[in-house]
Image: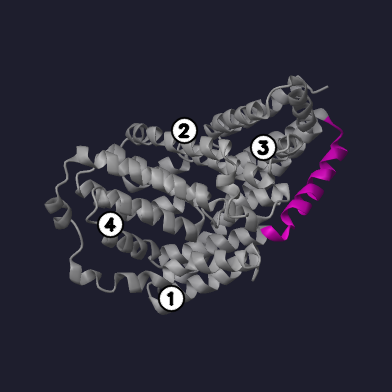
């Protein structure tokens, strides 16, 4: 029998800690430890370090800091500027060209960095001023950038997909492949929405021409960006062909990113290289702190029998499997209001994954469904990370305005989620 008082203690400590501004990793760990001490013999705590060791010693976790380093190398090496320039050059004469170019740039950059917030900070720094200069409304410019940045956690290489692979025992390579088509669907729908909205902006062709880069500056623009654009092809192609594992691909990607930024383009000065690694260490440490806290939190849930309780509860409901996935999606949505993506994945995957498998769902498809839900988490207040990224780019704008502009774009994610839900082949097609 699950202890109601212990569950209340767990949640109370967590929310009080979050309210007081305690970092999420420490808040999760603190609530887990207090609950374990309250509910069991202190000897149970000995099992927690063992669980941590088993989790963090998995080879796939090596890939996370490597992908972070790779993304920072391309970020500081101005890869985003070159990619946006290419997209803008080819799409500038299209109605809504600046917006569609922004979507294309977000999509391409997502295939390099694997992080939504980095995508917004990199592409948004260029795209938002360009859209505003062409008389786009703030709502369209901010919302497009927040949703476009969310592609960074779905289009491979994706850190959330790596975490899910580790927790579920799924193939990260298969997850990477499965995320491509749903990610492109979101990008296409976002582009269509931009084109539909563009006529109401009353942009004439003359205005578009006046606000684009002169042709003479664009002669070599594609040639300059080819090394940047080849990075995701190199990584995903190597994984798909079986040349290297996702972790090995991350290591090769770091070397490739360094060569592109420091040697080919020479846009990453030597003085910035220490900054790249310091930022990468900080980000990796923050991420792994959340992992540690979530593992402790998960240990407390296991001690309380929550996974088994939920599994038994759902099996006794005798409802259709799709109802169970709907309930999970609602839980993910609610958790997205208070927690960031990594925490939600680490807490819910050990609980929901066995339930999904018992209902006969494909583990790769379930992982994609989970990560698409996480895209909603990065754009929903109050802790949506992409909202804060937009705020960083437009510090004079109120958070209320940013939130208002972003929320309608969540419907695009929900639409793609529904399509992948109804037609699993969308995610599994590439895998055959």
How far is the residue under mark 2 from the one under mark 3?
20 Å
Q: CA distance from mark 3 to mark 1?
A: 40 Å
Mark toward the viewer: 2 or 3: 3
Badge 3, how many Cα within 10 Å: few under 14, some, many 20+?
A: some
* Image quarter (top left, top right, bottom left or bottom right) of the C terminus: bottom right
Q: Vertically, is 188 above or below 313?
A: below
Pointers 3 and 1 in contact (CB under 8 A)?
Answer: no
Q: Circle 3 sits on which residue?
A: 348
What kind of element bears circle 2? loop
Q: Is residue 46 magenta?
A: yes
Query: Is disc 1 placed on a helix, strand or loop?
Result: helix
Q: Position of residue 231 (x, y in %)?
A: 49, 68
Residue on which disc 1 sits: 262
Magenta span has 107? no
**Which of marks 1 and 2 precedes in the sequence?**
1
Q: Which residues are magenta?
A: 40-60
The answer for how far apart the CA atoms under marks 1 and 4 are is: 29 Å
Tell which tag, 3 or 1, sits nearer the viewer. Answer: 3
Disc 1: CA contacts within 10 A as few (<14), some (14-19) or many (>=20): some
Q: Nearer the viewer, mark 3 or mark 4?
A: 4
Q: Nearer the viewer, residue 415 or 15?
A: 415
* First in residue order: circle 2 vs circle 4: 4
Tell me residue 418's x, y (percent): 52, 35
Residues at marks 3 and 4, CA–CA distance in whole angstroms: 41 Å
Q: Pick the quarter of the image with the N terminus.
A: top right
Of residues 428 and 128, which is closer to you in this image? 428
Which residue is identified by label 2? Answer: 382
Residue 91: image tag: 4
Structural crowding at the residue carrying mark 2, measured as other residues with C-alpha within 10 Å and reported as few (<14), some (14–19) or many (≥20) = some
């Amino acid at each position: 029998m699950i202890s109601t008082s212990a569950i209340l203690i767990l949640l109370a400590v967590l929310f009080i800690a979050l309210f007081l501004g305690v970092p999420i990793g420490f808040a999760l760990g603190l609530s887990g430890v207090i609950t374990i001490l309250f509910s069991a013999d202190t000897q149970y705590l000995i099992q927690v370090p063992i669980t941590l060791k088993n989790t963090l010693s998995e080879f796939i976790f090596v890939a996370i800091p490597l992908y972070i380093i790779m993304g920072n190398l391309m970020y500081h090496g101005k890869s985003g500027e070159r990619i946006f320039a290419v997209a803008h050059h080819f799409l500038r004469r299209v109605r809504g060209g600046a917006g569609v170019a922004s979507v294309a740039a977000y999509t391409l950059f997502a295939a390099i960095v694997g992080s939504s917030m980095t995508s917004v900070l990199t592409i948004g720094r260029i795209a938002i001023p360009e859209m505003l200069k062409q008389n786009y409304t703030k709502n369209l410019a901010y919302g497009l950038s927040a949703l476009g940045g969310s592609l960074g956690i779905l289009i491979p290489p994706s850190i959330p997909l790596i975490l899910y692979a580790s927790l579920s025992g799924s193939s990260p390579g298969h997850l990477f492949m499965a995320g491509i088509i749903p990610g492109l669907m979101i990008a296409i729908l976002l582009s269509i929405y931009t084109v539909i909205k563009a006529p109401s902006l009353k942009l004439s062709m003359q205005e578009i021409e006046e606000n684009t880069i002169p042709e003479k500056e664009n002669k070599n623009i594609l040639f300059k960006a080819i090394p940047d654009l080849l990075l995701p092809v190199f990584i995903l192609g190597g994984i798909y062909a079986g040349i290297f594992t996702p972790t090995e691909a991350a290591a090769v990607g770091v070397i490739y990113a360094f060569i592109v930024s420091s040697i080919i383009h020479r846009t990453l000065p030597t003085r910035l290289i220490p900054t790249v690694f310091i930022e990468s260490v900080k980000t990796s440490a923050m991420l792994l702190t959340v992992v540690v806290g979530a593992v402790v939190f998960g240990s407390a849930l296991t001690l309380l029998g929550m996974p088994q309780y939920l599994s038994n509860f759902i099996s006794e409901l005798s409802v259709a499997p799709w109802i169970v996935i709907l309930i999970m999606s609602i839980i993910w949505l609610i958790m997205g209001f208070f927690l960031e993506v990594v925490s939600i994945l680490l807490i819910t995957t050990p609980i929901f994954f066995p339930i999904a498998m018992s209902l006969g769902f494909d583990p790769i498809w379930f992982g994609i469904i989970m990560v698409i839900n996480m895209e909603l988490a990065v754009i929903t207040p109050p802790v949506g990370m992409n909202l804060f990224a937009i705020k960083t780019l437009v510090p004079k704008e109120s958070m209320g305005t940013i939130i208002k502009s972003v929320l309608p774009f969540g419907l695009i994610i929900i639409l793609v989620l529904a399509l992948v839900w109804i037609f699993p082949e969308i995610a599994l097609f590439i895998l055959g």
